[in-house]
Amino acid sequence: MTLSLLVLLLLVGCSSPKGQYPIKEIDQEIVSGNFTRATELIDSLVAGGELNETQEYALRFTRDSLHRVRLDFNQTKDEIIGWIEKNRLFTPSDSLLDVWEQSKALEFRIIDGKKRYFRNAAPNIFRVNASSITLSSDTPRDSLLIEDFNRKTKSDTKGRYLLPAKTMRASYTLAVNADAVPEGETLKAWLPFPRKDIDRQTEVRLLSTSQPDYILSDDQTEHTSIYMEQKAERGKPAVFKAEFLFTSQGEWFDLSEIEIKPYNKQNEQYKTYTSEHPPHIRFSENIRKLADSITQGAQTPVETLQAVYRYIAANFPWTSALEYSTIANIPEYVIKNRKGDCGQVTLLMITMLRYKGIPARWQSGWMTHPGEVNLHDWAEVYFEGTGWVPVDISFGRGGTIPIRPGREFFMSGIDSYRLYINSGFSGKFYPEKRYPRSETVDFQRGEAESGQWNLYFDQWKYKMELSYQ
């Protein structure tokens, strides 16, 4: 569930206007699932004109969050049953639905007195059932990796091997729906753009833009973007487009060959990447207990990584995920629901490794495999004496690969079909975004806003087109 208003206001330090700010009443309505009543209370307060800027911002974002949850949880019981009947060839009983709900395989919320299921709840049921995982995951065709792994070359770093590089041309489009904002209002868009500060990504070149005036963030923030503006025209979508080239090269570290030195724990990099990063990287009791239990026999950083990686790969199947902005703490969500998509299990892995004193950081962008282009998240782990090693826990789940490291190639390797955009999560943009982000953790689809407020994902569309050089 989304952050409660009470928690949100405490985080931003809001106080009650003239002592009449009904935080608890609105919060209780949200907790009870009375979204319409909570929205009415929020609208009334905002219209009253007695709020300071921080209070109004918090209230408007809370209202927006309720809208996001409604979009995510939009399926009725009949629609869930209908999907199962069509795709699984049987009609589930009420008692079976109850079992699925209790196991959290079938996610739902009570919204305005009605039970509403997650938009992808039906297929997720069969993804979490280990005996019948036959639906899509985020793992691409293994043939691409097998071909490249067999052509790898040794680098100057002991234990490090390079995979053949791939040059790709991308055309990215973000189109704001017609009449999403009044005519003449300025629309602002941040489109994803390749980073230039990642060794595995080179030869980045901007080819064209839909607007002659633009701003490249140039790796000044965790999220690399190209920013553009245009005026809204009545009856017409506002289209933002950028074309660019980049080259990606995969690598693999043979963990049996690399030499691990003791960490310099006074180093600022070590401190940064072994620390908590609220709200999603917290060393909670659940995290500490789980990490300690699965790494009991680990004697080295490599053995700790192996233990954490193997546990997550074996116990948290891939499922379509709720919007990250509606989850208060993603690793805790994964542990509680025993499932997660690529970014969710990556955050769980990063959190556990950091708690165990192993530097780990977020990376993300797109998987760019021919025919399987999609958003994707992964991580890097730091070993003293070797450097940063890529780890894609999500691709390490399910099936086998007929190469020497097998699926565990992704424990210390990454393929060449990547577009790197983010070197961290929940960062700022350049130019800075004024209003709340649609995606509060990651940045892959883009972001858009007007002079009045953020434009959420239901108000615009995005499209990535790739060709291979």
Image (cartoon, rainbow, N blue to C red):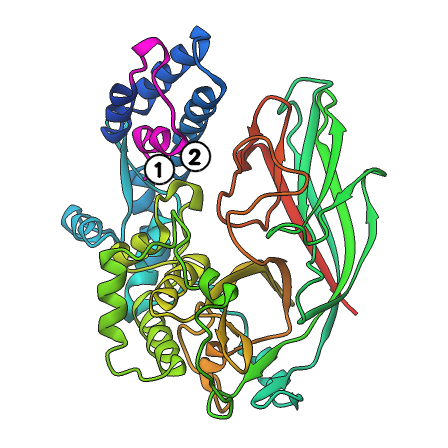
Displayed quadrant of residue 157:
bottom right
What is the quadrant of the C terminus in the image?
A: bottom right
Which residue is located at x 22 percent, y 65 percent? 289
Residue displayed at 36% across by 15% down: 40
Query: Against 107, is 400 above or below?
Result: below
> Going by the image, does 126 lie left or right of 231?
left
**Mark 2 Cα-neighbour bin, 10 Å: few <14, some 14–19, many ≥20:** many
Q: Is residue 225 left or right of residue 341?
A: right
Does 307 appear above or below 51?
Answer: below
Residue 451 seen in the figure: yes
Evaluate whether residue 137 shows in this view: no
Instruction: Quickly name the residue at label 2.
Output: 68
Asked whether 244 falls inside the magenta stretch, the response is: no
Is the Cβ of the residue at disc 2 closer than 8 Å to that at disc 1? yes
Q: What segment is highlighted magenta in the picture?
A: 1-22
**Considering the numbered disc 2 on the image, is that residue within a helix, a strand or a loop?**
helix
Residue 182, given in percent of the width and then of the height, sits at 66, 17
Mark 1, secondary structure of its residue: loop
- Marks 2 and 1, the one that precedes in the sequence: 1
In the image, residue 434 sits, relative to residue 1, either above or below, namely above
Q: Quadrant of residue 374?
A: bottom right
Q: Residue 274, image x and y in percent?
A: 42, 64
Q: In the drawing, what numbered circle is on residue 2?
A: 1
- Label tally: 2
Q: Please identify the residue farthest to the left as the structure is shown.
A: 95
Q: Amino acid at mark 1?
A: Thr
The N terminus lies in quadrant: top left
The amino acid type of the residue labelled 2 equals: Arg
Q: In this image, 271 relative to 370: left or right?
A: left
